[in-house]
């Protein structure tokens, strides 16, 4: 399992590889938080929030949840862990940039993914 410090180092490496304009107006930057976060719509506490794009009156930032990464990817190779971390960061950066542009495509995609998850969980529970 990777430590929070190792995860933060990987995250810094990833940030350094991405084009700077993607981070425009991201006033709070990218932070890593120690907690595991379960999605409020999780049926069996099995839907983890890996990262979030956050907007408030004090600014915008991207949160990466180390506890969620440790739970889901705690036993994978460094390459797999790094790639998943990268995917989550890019996903949250897309939320940021779509918000700046006035688009909701990724929000709608995420909502559809949650709806599909809920349908699958209902089917699974009916089969039990």
Image (cartoon, helix red, strand yellow):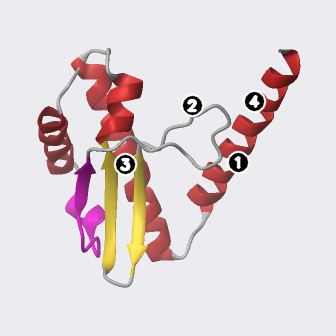
Q: Nearer the viewer, mark 2 or mark 3?
A: 2
Give the vertical position of 52 relative to 54 (above or below). above
Determine which quarter of the picture holds residue 45: top right
Mark 1 lies on residue: 112
Residue 54 picture quarter: bottom left
Q: Residue 57: x and y, percent? A: 38, 84
Local crowd size for mark 1, using a 10 Å CA cut-off: few (<14), some (14–19), many (≥20): few
**Quadrant the C terminus occupies:** top right
Helix, strand or loop under label 2: loop
Name the residue carrying label 3.
90
Q: What x and y, as percent, mark residue 7?
A: 19, 36
Between the residue at mark 3 and the residue at mark 1, the CA separation in whole angstroms equals 19 Å
Q: Is residue 39 left or right of residue 119?
A: left
Mark 2 sits on what residue?
Answer: 46
| Numbered disc 3: secondary structure | helix
Magenta range is: 19-33
SS state under label 1: helix
Crowding near the residue tagged with mark 3, few <14, some 14–19, many ≥20 C-alpha atoms within 10 Å: some
127 w.r.t. 92: above or below: above
Q: Is residue 124 left or right of residue 8?
A: right
User: How far from the left and from the top, in percent, is residue 107?
Assistant: 59, 59
Residue 11 percent across, percent down from the top left: 20, 43
Q: CA distance from mark 1 to mark 4?
A: 14 Å
Whether the magenta-drawn stretch holds residue 32 is answered as yes
The answer to if 58 sits in the magenta stretch is no
Q: Are marks 4 and 3 in contact (CB under 8 Å)?
A: no
Q: Which residue is mark 4?
A: 121
């Amino acid at each position: 399992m990777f430590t929070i410090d190792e995860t933060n180092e990987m995250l810094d490496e990833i940030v350094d590889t991405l084009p700077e304009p993607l981070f425009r107006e991201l006033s709070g930057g990218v932070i890593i938080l120690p907690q595991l976060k379960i999605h409020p719509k999780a049926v069996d506490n099995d839907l983890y929030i890996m990262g979030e794009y956050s907007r408030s009156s004090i600014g915008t930032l991207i949160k990466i949840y180390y506890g969620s990464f440790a739970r889901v990817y705690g036993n994978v190779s460094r390459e797999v862990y790094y790639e998943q971390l990268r995917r989550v960061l890019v996903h949250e950066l897309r939320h940021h940039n779509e918000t700046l542009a006035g688009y909701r495509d990724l929000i709608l995609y995420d909502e559809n993914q949650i709806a599909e998850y809920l349908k699958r969980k209902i089917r699974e529970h009916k089969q039990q």
